[in-house]
Amino acid sequence: MDFTERVNSNIESLDRASMDEAKSRQDSLTKPLGSLGKLEDISIQIAGIKKDARPSIDKKVIIVMAGDHGISEAGVSAFPKEVTPQMVLNFANGGAGINVLSRHVGAEVRIVDIGVDADIESEVVINKKIKMGTDNFINGPAMTRDEAISALNVGIDIVTDEVLSGADLIATGDMGIGNTTASTAILRVLSGLDINEITGRGTGIDEEGLVRKQELILEAIQMNDPNSGDAIDVLSKLGGLEIAGLAGVTLGAAMNRVPVIIDGFISAAAALVAAKIAPRSVEYMIASHISVEPGHGFIWRELGLDPILDLNMRLGEGTGAALTMSIVEAACKVLSEMATFAEASVSDKSEKEERVK
Amino acid sequence: MDFTERVNSNIESLDRASMDEAKSRQDSLTKPLGSLGKLEDISIQIAGIKKDARPSIDKKVIIVMAGDHGISEAGVSAFPKEVTPQMVLNFANGGAGINVLSRHVGAEVRIVDIGVDADIESEVVINKKIKMGTDNFINGPAMTRDEAISALNVGIDIVTDEVLSGADLIATGDMGIGNTTASTAILRVLSGLDINEITGRGTGIDEEGLVRKQELILEAIQMNDPNSGDAIDVLSKLGGLEIAGLAGVTLGAAMNRVPVIIDGFISAAAALVAAKIAPRSVEYMIASHISVEPGHGFIWRELGLDPILDLNMRLGEGTGAALTMSIVEAACKVLSEMATFAEASVSDKSEKEERVK
């Protein structure tokens, strides 16, 4: 059985009975029908994922994958490549945005070196390095198909271990200078959308840099000629290692029946790859936020997901997903903890129905 | 000194020096410039409010005001009027949406009976009843000008007491069957917007009910002829007591230099009244979410505020504001806890500037 078959055979649809029961309970709670909007939708989705009509969230884990990109030597980012390992150490030391926000929401963070182009000396960082960054996709494939599948499996294995240790809500996060370039290239091939519509400024390049980024992406697509019907081929040829790892995390969450919150543009590109490999995995995804990076919204549209937060963020690292974890947890608490009309002796709308008419 | 003069003389502008210092610090933190979007803006606003370049949030209090509306006897709501006191008791017993969400974010809730048309027997509910609900504004003013000013003062006094007891982040919330009707009437007069654009279905009335609600609002405005240049006159004539109380809470927060998160449509109508009484109070406001109720977005536009959450909620009670409290707290933690480029030895963008060109 090949990778794609194995993954698909291990992802079930959501449990309808639990979802129906959760919906009935939502409708019996002391509030106008549907008035908690997306909180209600999320709670029902999670009931279906966990086969539990009153699910709770007990352990939240954010998996941040870091990797380097050969294309970064072309100056597609506002920051130099050394920033990838520097930021990984910043994560390890607890000083980055993701550290602050994960502490705030009570989530644990796993930092995975899946392809940083430097030796990372830290006991906190999980070493799953496939290689020292991808190759520059201007000259040929970013990685081999085998390397891409290894990276996907790293993600699946990590999330499986976390679920075995009790994690019941997973979030994705990324670090990798140059990775909006790879993500934009993936989106271009998998969606066919116009490069001008989907390319953004990443960490903050100028107009000249933006044009150059678009040219490089089109050039790389032309020279590598990825098969848009084969997401693993697209992933191999355009990169990156952390995107492959995060696609694996996303698939692994679905394989383990755990909800996965998708962070920013890079995590969303990984989720798009996951959705192409195993379409049912989308049922397990929750869209965290809509970022300033224009491609982000296009991916949510492709996936049919509606993001929860709109905070003009564009940091990645899992920062948007971390904030969303708190909202998802709140959604489950509403479903479990609110009183019903009967319990609270509150007159239900139905009792009024005839009076109004 | 009359009410309006007293309030205005007690609201200062935000502290520019603290805001500039907070902005400089944000720009030195290990992230691309501005990449935490609204989190950065909020942290800078709160620095200006608290005169502290690294503010923290230590005690969060949600003030929920409950009152009845004479107009509810005309059947403008999907729920009967008895639901107001029933829900107040549900709040007191901890079973409502606001209880679940405030526990989740670690906020305390104060429940204030400022005009419920029933005797509330609960030690938890703060009794500040001005009268047993407003009068039906179809027959004359909802309340007298003196009653409106008393209700405004109730809000100011409650928030002042809370700040003296350590509260440093306030949120508003409402309960009152019929209060989207009063809020829509206020918005219509203070903004001049088309009644068809701003009227919504509240807790869930049908098409026929919606048309009737619009007719009643226009009728009430015509018969009471409120002076659109005098927000207290508008408030007195259209109601309600809880809207007046929440306008007072909003003003009181500004008078005490504490940020105030404005909840749903009713709280926003109260904030609009506050802004008309004391325009500088807007600097202290944070817009929580954009609800399904169409007038909500119009009020944010009138106030020049940009809501943080978009969750299709329309429950009121402070539920949207409670979730927003967690985001505001996160914003302050980012400002205080993240490492700077220098502290984390991460290469700043500026070091690259010449390399890219």
Image (spheres, coloured by chain):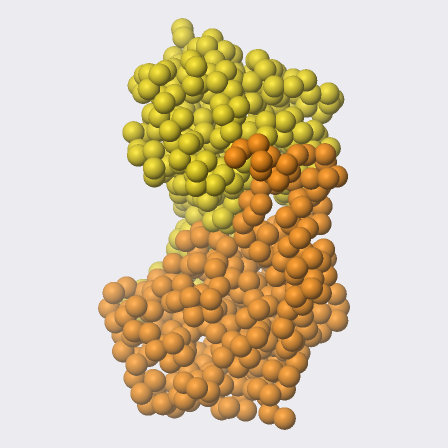
Chain colours: A yellow, B orange
Q: Looking at the image, is A297 positioned above or below residue B300?
A: above
Q: Looking at the image, is A146 positioned above or below residue B137?
A: above
User: In the depicted view, which residue is nearer to us: B69 or A94?
Assistant: A94
Say which residue appears at 64% left-offset and 49% top-offset.
B26
Say which residue appears at 59% left-offset and 27% top-offset.
A81
User: In the depicted view, which residue is nearer to us: A100 or B316?
Assistant: A100
Marks counted in the figure total: 0
Q: Quadrant of residue A116?
A: top right
Q: Position of residue B173 (x, y in %)?
A: 54, 66
Say which residue appears at 57% left-offset and 69% top-offset.
B283
Q: Is residue B164 visible?
A: yes
Q: Is residue A37 left or right of residue A335?
A: left
Q: Position of residue A242 (x, y in %)?
A: 53, 23
Q: Is residue A324 visible?
A: no
Q: Is residue B309 left or right of residue A198?
A: right
Q: Position of residue A293 (x, y in %)?
A: 45, 40
Q: Quadrant of residue A62?
A: top right
Q: Quadrant of residue A174?
A: top right
Q: Looking at the image, is B299 positioned above or below residue A292?
A: below
Q: Position of residue A190 (x, y in %)?
A: 34, 26
User: In the depicted view, which residue is nearer to us: A84 or A223?
Assistant: A223
In the rendered image, the quadrant that contains the C terminus of chain A is bottom left
Q: Is residue A33 left or right of residue B128?
A: left
Say which residue appears at 55% left-offset and 59% top-offset.
B321
